Image (tube, coloured by chain):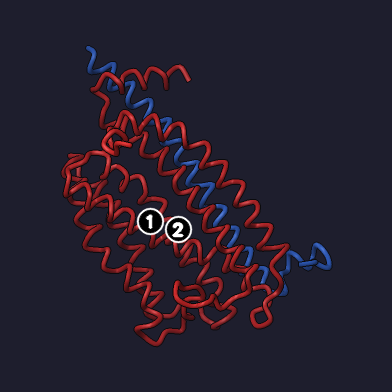
Chain colours: A red, B blue
Amino acid sequence: MNLYHYAAPATFYRLAGRWTPWFAWGAGLLTGIGLYISFFVAPTDFQQGEAYRIIFIHVPAAWMSMFIYLVMAFWCAIGLAFNTRLSFLMARALAPTGAMFCFLALWTGALWGKPMWGAWWVWDARLTSQLILLFLYVGIMALWAAIDDPKRGDRAGALLILVGAVNVPIIYFSVEWWNTLHQGSSINLTKAPSMATIMLVGMLVMAIAAWLYTIAVAFVRVRGLILERERHTDWAQEAMKALKEA
Amino acid sequence: MEWQSGTAFWSMGGYGLYVWGSFGVTALGVALEIGLLRSGQRSLRNRLQRMQRWEAQ
């Protein structure tokens, strides 16, 4: 397999178009299964009652907000190093979804914090660093919107993303490095998860659904961006004709 | 997990506001993103067609 082949905008445009429905349907199916587990299979928590069910949204959203950022940073590094056109477009296509998941992590966290801690918000290290992540997302998108020249915008955004990437490990390890009100991670690679298996399964199903959703949405967005950038090429003119007829 | 009644399901043991507030806003966010994506695609298509016509002149 030749990766450079798929890095060509024309090839990737077609490939993304073919795969989008599969990711979208997969996301819908897994969301259905995940919601069923969240509400009808997972039992009541002995400490938190039914309020803990927020975890099925909260944790996948928080994971996605960090992971999407790292993926964006990866593509920006590739773009800056190899000057590949598609890489920056991937970052641009992912940012709005990352921002949405970041907002949802904070929102569901507030709704979980109120009944459990008695406060919607506290300035603890985990919450504060997650809020900074949201500001980074918004700042990056604002920067892109402010720069008219697409190539300069790509590079400026990429630099901001790479510098901001230092925040992701800070979010992840904040619960270990500082005394936080936020609990430590329930899952980690080196020790057994500190939660019931079915709760873990529900959370993972929701997380995979969020992944598939992100890929589907990012593919649709990146196809639009590719067409816009490549509109002077023959293949893009053909693709636009196909769009018109559809 | 067996719910005693529909009301019990909606009240979520007294945490209904928090649980449904979380799942509801998430559903809203996803619906909003998909809606914006659709309208964005439409306006992009129109913009590209306009630019094509303009550049052809």
Kindly give the residue lying farthest to the top in the view shown.
B57
In the image shown, does A187 or A191 lie closer to the viewer?
A: A191
Which quadrant of the view contains residue A46? Answer: bottom right
Q: Residue at x 47, y 65 (%)?
A: A105
Q: Residue at x 67, y 61 (%)?
A: A37
| Residue B7 higher or lower than A190, as above or below | above
| Residue A15 higher or lower than A193, as above or below | above
Mark 1 = which residue? Answer: A68
Q: Quadrant of the N terminus of chain A?
A: top left
Estimate the x, y position of residue A14 in percent, counting from the top left. Answer: 39, 29
Q: Identify which amino acid the numbered label 1 is placed on.
A: Ile
Between circles 1 and 2, the one closer to the viewer is: 1
Q: Residue at x 21, y 63 (%)?
A: A163
Q: Is residue A87 visible?
A: yes
**In screen coordinates, is A151 left or right of A71?**
left
Estimate the x, y position of residue B34 in percent, counting from the top left. Answer: 50, 43
Mark 2 = which residue? Answer: A101
Estimate the x, y position of residue B24 in percent, counting from the top left. Answer: 60, 58
Does dot 2 land on a helix, a strand or a loop? helix
Q: Chain of mark 1?
A: A
Does dot 1 land on a helix, a strand or a loop? helix
Determine crowd level at label 1: few under 14, some 14-19, many 20+ residues with C-alpha closer than 10 A. Answer: many
**In screen coordinates, is A145 left or right of A196?**
left
Q: CA distance from mark 1 to mark 2?
A: 9 Å
Q: Chain of mark 2?
A: A
Q: Identify which amino acid the numbered label 2 is placed on.
A: Phe
| Residue A23 higher or lower than A179, as above or below | above
Q: Is residue A123 visible?
A: no
| Residue A55 marker | none
Along the polypeptide, which appears first: circle 1 or circle 2? Answer: 1
